[in-house]
Image (spheres, helix red, strand yellow):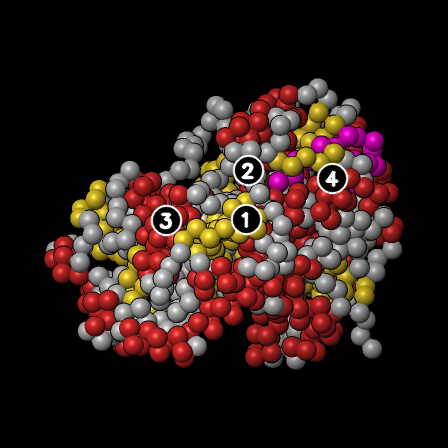
Amino acid sequence: MKTLGFLVNPISGMGGSVGLKGTDGLYEKALELGAEKISKKRAQVFFEYLGNTKDVKLLVPSGEMGEDLVKNKGFEYEVVYNFKGLSSREDTIKTVQEFKKRKVDLIIFCGGDGTARDICEVVSTEVPVIGMPAGVKMFSSVFAINPKAASEILKAFLEGNSRYKDSDVLDIDEESYRADKFKMKLYGYLKTPYIPNLVQDAKTLFEGQDEEMAKEGIAIFASEFMSDGSLYIVGAGSTTAKIAEVMGLKKTILGVDLIKDEKLVASDVNEKAILEHIKDEKSVKIIVSPIGAQGFVFGRGNQQLSSQVLRKVGKENIIIIATPQKLENTPFLLVDTGDDELDNQLSGKTLVVCGYRMAQRKEIRKD
Amino acid sequence: MERTKIFLDENQMPKKWYNIQADLPKALPPVYSPRTLKQATLEELSVLFPMEILKQEVSQERWIDIPQEIRDIYAVWRPSPLYRALRLEKALKTPAKIYFKWEGISPAGSHKPNTAVPQAYYNMKEGTQTITTETGAGQWGSALSYATSLFDITCRVYMVRVSYEQKPYRRNLIHLWGAEVFPSPSNKTNAGRSILKDNPEHPGSLGIAISEAVEDAATHEDTKYSLGSVLNHVCMHQTVIGLESKEQLKMEEKYPDIVIGCVGGGSNFAGISFPFLHDKLKGNKKDLRVIAVEPHSCPTLTKGLYAFDYGDSTKLGPIAKMFTLGHDFIPPGIHAGGLRYHGASPIVSSLKDQNIIEAQAYHQTEVFEAAMLFAQTEGHVPAPETAHAIKSAIEEAKKCKQTGEEKVILFNASGHGHFDLKSYELFIHGKLTDYEYPADLVKQSLKKLPKIKED
């Protein structure tokens, strides 16, 4: 018997427009406008696909955040948190804290980037999470494509046939949002189960592997070619962080670090510090991993790597890395540096390092 | 009407294999022992191979007799037909004349039995009771199972675990022909056990499977090891392909301008091309172009280094001079599994090094496009490996369309793709990935080859 935490963010779906920072009035209006319908409907579809799975127990928050969707469906469930009035992010956080306290095997949620971020704050990568999309813009990569896919992943999880990957949690950077700039920030990682695509690479040796092994392959390769004396600007993310780990360095996962000759030169640097550091360097290279479900190489989650930095380093010195698991779900990569000419330069076919001495040919497009 | 198939009678089957070592402008560098880093001796190698095979490996005789017992078995599928690809030519609107040698009609469905049978035969002659080998997707394992079944030899196949689990058809063929097949890493060998101890779920690799098969052979009485490509004697056994093709083209009063084969280890390429290279090396056919085709994801001949390297990732096999991407390189999971080898035959490598042959590389999706065109025009469904040769032939034929030249293009259709339909399905649904070898980054990091001082 597995215990699953289930929660719905009834107001998600308004994401970038009225969203989580709206006033109470707008909040209610959003509900009226049908935000509730989106997440509720998605969750209903999910349960239809799931059918009568008997050997699970569901832990849910009260009312429209959970209970309403599971009662009278033949599931064994327990309400672990009661919320009053309109649901807020505190309610999500408190619910997930209850889930964690009761040691759930898995959390399923229906919501958007904000909900993912709230869950991430509590459980990080400690408990696996399946996200069901209920928003317009979904940048975090924790989300299954649709409720049907989410139900299949859950079934595989229950049968012990799923594997895990780190999914980045992105949300709109509030500061830049207020300044009327659309910038995404990387907030952390959730551990998400997925069904390995056994068919895609039937003859390969790595398709049976976890994403973790793929990351290690990339990192070992990178640690070999990075000993060429160049200063490396290493972008955010768990794949790039693995490189530092292999070299025995401590890198910030969410920030940009500088590495030269297998030594950490500077940590969590901003644009200004990067420009200062590379001023007198002979050879500078950038290593980045695409961020988020849409696969942004630049322009989301790594604003430090500004167009000025990129122009200075040069297109030919940019090395993109990503695990096959990540690339499988992103048919092409995106750039949005805010510098149209540079975006044009960066667009086109490029190599993405995806394993030990291994790369894939991928297309980069402008957002 | 132009002829579609050109047949030879069974009594026109070659009576001798062609040994290109007799005609190489530069003798092959010696093979070194991985233990001593000195020249490997026949005694060392005789633990693994029967003496007659070792003699063939180093022989400088130009022609080596094919024993009658082997020719009797060859007759099951040989001589194989030579096809004129009239419908493909028409689709391409090319003035070129495209011929292909169809090896897909052998029992195992590829050229592999051409060497599996003689290897099993010589082992039987010298009293071998059991032969061990490794197999990736199962092509070689099934061919050797077929061959050993003919001589009442036990065969133990170590099959890369992910393929064992995901590719049941070749595994079933191995069983059907009476061989034993184990998922590698297995608990039958020290090599396998030590890997399973660290990771009981290890997906396996060709390198590990080689180590297991070699260890099995080296530690059991009357047990030898067999390799399906790369080695000189294997390349020589395959020359029946080119020798027949030559006779068949002669019947059409043709001689090829271009000969094409795909390269993994290099044996099918050797088979189709060496008999024609014989003429070129003698100085008769100076303009003959011979093209080795490989995947961009494992571009041994186009991007590799010509150096001494281990033949396998576990450094158990002999060290030979060849084009290599490094013995620790595990090629990505392209669907042409047979072309996923870090090195290449030392003879093919030497020919490339001296620019006697040329090499081309293509991406997986463009290769499958070519395979589809071939299947839609010629009917036969090629193996993804074979499709590399087809792609090159199509490109050369397109050039002829531009220049108006009526060149004769010959390629080896090394095997059928009936067990690869899943790959075709993925291609049709746009789900194939184009892998590419990051050559520049590798150059920045390549420093792990064994250090050999040439005597």
Give the Cα separation between the discs numbered 4 and 2.
Answer: 25 Å
Q: Which of label 3 and label 4 is nearer to you?
A: 3
Dot 4 or dot 2: first in sequence order is 4
Q: Quadrant of the C terminus of chain A?
A: bottom left
* Quarter of the view holding residue B287: bottom right
Numbered tag placed on residue A57 in the rendering: 1
Element type at marker 3?
helix
Q: Kindly identify the residue that appears in the image at 58 percent across and 24 percent down.
A: B190
Please tell me which of labels 3 and 1 falls first in the chain.
1
Q: Residue at x 62, y 40 (%)?
A: B161
Same subunit, tags 2 and 3: no
Mark 3 Cα-neighbour bin, 10 Å: few <14, some 14–19, many ≥20: some
Q: Left of B122 or right of it: where is B439?
A: left
Q: Which residue is mark 3?
A: A97
Q: Position of residue B156 (x, y in %)?
A: 71, 32
CA gap, disc 2 and disc 3: 36 Å
